């Protein structure tokens, strides 16, 4: 899997994001492009903002034991896979705003670097290795950029 913490990979992902347009159609799934960008921003909001409630102990146990492996592994997500409720975007979003927010989040993450994330607690899964953080960040972005054919 590509390493999102490397400048070349970050630039490649941002180039793909810059190929998106407000009217581009998805190849699968229900979200439009603006909703997808907002959806991808949630991953970073859970890292950098305190706007999403953390799961309680029981839910965190479930997430660590049943979901974590799917999220942090190198195995790609299947098309139209189920989305966790906190990641579902139903309202309309502003394309340019969500796109810039996502690019800013990706750049911030790359500048902080993989060592910043190594052993850092995640919102839902507890401590993750730098490889697990990379897999979670890159795989999710790659999945949704492929969803829109870029």
Image: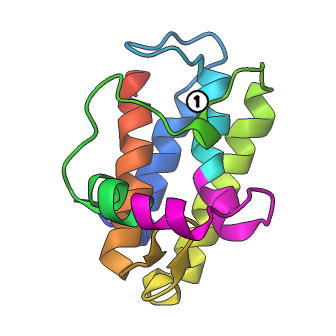
Decide if residue 90 is on the left or right side of residue 113: right
Q: Which corner quadrant holds the N terminus? A: bottom left
Residue 39 coordinates in the image, percent (x, y) = 61, 38
Is 52 in the magenta? Answer: yes
Residue at 52 percent of width and 29 percent of height: 19
Colour treatment of the image: rainbow
Decide if residue 78 is on the left or right side of residue 125: left
Residue 81 coordinates in the image, percent (x, y) = 35, 29
- Helix, strand or loop at label 1? It is helix
Residue at 40 percent of width and 30 percent of height: 82
The residue that label 1 is drawn on is: 36
When the figure is inspected, residue 76 is found, relative to residue 149, above or below; the finding is: below
Dot 1 alpha-carbon crowd within 10 angstroms: few under 14, some 14 to 19, many 20 or more: many
Q: Which corner quadrant holds the C terminus? A: top left
Q: Residue furthest left?
A: 75
Decide if residue 138 is on the left or right side of residue 103: left
When the figure is inspected, residue 97 is found, relative to residue 5, above or below; the finding is: above
Q: Quadrant of residue 119?
A: bottom left
Viewer-nearest residue: 36 or 99: 36
Residue numbers of the magenta segment: 43-62
Number of numbered labels in the structure image: 1
When the figure is inspected, residue 86 is found, relative to residue 139, above or below; the finding is: above
Q: Quadrant of residue 18?
A: top right
Magenta stretch: dominant secondary structure: helix
When the figure is inspected, residue 20 is found, relative to residue 39, above or below; the finding is: above
Is 59 in the magenta? Answer: yes
Residue at 28 percent of width and 52 percent of height: 70
Residue 26 coordinates in the image, percent (x, y) = 46, 14
């Amino acid at each position: 899997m590509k390493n999102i913490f490397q400048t070349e990979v970050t630039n490649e992902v941002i180039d793909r994001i810059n190929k998106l347009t407000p009217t581009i159609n998805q190849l699968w799934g229900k979200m439009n492009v603006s909703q997808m960008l907002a959806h991808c921003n949630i991953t970073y909001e859970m890292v950098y903002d305190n706007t999403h409630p953390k799961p309680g102990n029981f839910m965190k146990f479930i997430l660590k034991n049943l979901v974590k492996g799917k999220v942090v592994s190198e195995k790609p997500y299947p098309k139209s896979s189920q989305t966790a409720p906190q990641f579902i975007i139903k309202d309309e979003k502003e394309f340019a705003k969500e796109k810039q927010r996502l690019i800013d989040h990706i750049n911030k993450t790359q500048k902080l670097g993989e060592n910043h994330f190594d052993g850092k607690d995640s919102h839902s899964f507890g401590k993750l290795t730098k490889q697990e953080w990379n897999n979670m960040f890159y795989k999710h972005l790659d999945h949704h950029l492929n969803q829109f054919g870029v």
